[in-house]
Image (cartoon, rainbow, N blue to C red):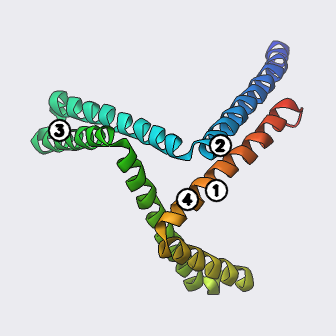
Amino acid sequence: MTAQSATESTSNRPAAVKGARRALLLAGLAGIGFGAAILLWPTKTAVALTGVIALYAVLAGIVYVGIGVIGKELGTGGRIAHILLGALYVVAGAYAFSSLKESAAFLALFLTIMVGFMWIIEGFAALFTLGQSGSKAVGAIFAIISVVAGLTLLSNAIWGAVFLWWFVAISLIVLGILNVVRGLTKQA
C-alpha cells in the first residue's frame, strides 16, 4: 500500500462512517414512522401496503409478459410460461386494486395462517433434532413455545393477525429508536 492510497483510505473512512450513521438515522426514522402509522391507522396502513403489493404485482406481470414476448432464447415453453405468469400477476394485482380492503384482510389472514404453520413445523423440527442440540433444555423450551405460539395463532387467525400487526408496529418503533440512537452516536 502506498502512502497516497493509505491517506485516501483514511480520509474516506470518516465519510463512510458518516454515511452509515446517516443511513441508520434515516432507516430509524422511517421505522418509527411506519410503526406509528400502523399503531395510529392500522386498517389504512394495511390497505396502503396491499396497494403497494398490488402495484408490484401489476408491474412484475408486465415485465414477465415483456420477457415472454421478446425472449427468443427462452424457447416456446419458456415464453408461454412467462406470458401466463405475467398475466396471472397482472390479474391478481388488478383484483387487489379493485377491492383493497378485502385483499388486505385476506393477506393478513393468509400470512397469519402461514406463520402459525411455520412456527408449528419449526417447533417439531426442533424436537426432532433435540439429540443434536448443544442444550437439550433450551431446544425443548424453544420447541414447546414455537408449537404453542403456532397453535395460538391458528386457533383464532383474526386475533392472531391483529397481534402480528401490533407486534410489527412495536418492533418497527423500538428498532427505529435504537437505529436513531446508533445514528446519532459514534457507536455506529
Q: CA distance from mark 1 to mark 2?
A: 9 Å
Q: Are marks 1 and 3 in contact (CB under 8 Å)?
A: no
Residue holding disc 2: 35
Residue type, label 3: Ile
Q: Amino acid at mark 4?
A: Val
Q: Residues within 10 Å of mark 3 (few under 14, many from 20)?
A: many
Q: Which mark is residue 167?
A: 1
The numbered mark, 2 or 3, whose residue comes first in the sequence reads 2
The residues bearing labels 4 and 2 have C-alpha atoms spaced at a distance of: 14 Å
Q: Nearer the viewer, residue 150 or 137?
A: 150
Q: Position of residue 24 (x, y in %)?
A: 74, 33
Residue bearing the label numbered 3: 83
Q: Amino acid at mark 2?
A: Gly
Camera-side residue: 29 or 123? 29
- Determine the CA span between mark 4 and mark 1: 8 Å
Name, please, the residue furthest toward the top: 4
Tell me the amino acid under the disc marked 1: Phe
Q: Earlier in the sequence, mark 1 or mark 2?
A: 2
Quadrant for residue 33, please give it.
top right
Q: Secondary structure at mark 4?
A: helix
Which labelled disc corresponds to residue 162?
Answer: 4
Q: Nearer the viewer, mark 1 or mark 3?
A: 1
Q: Residue at x 73, y 85 (%)?
A: 137
Helix, strand or loop under label 1: helix
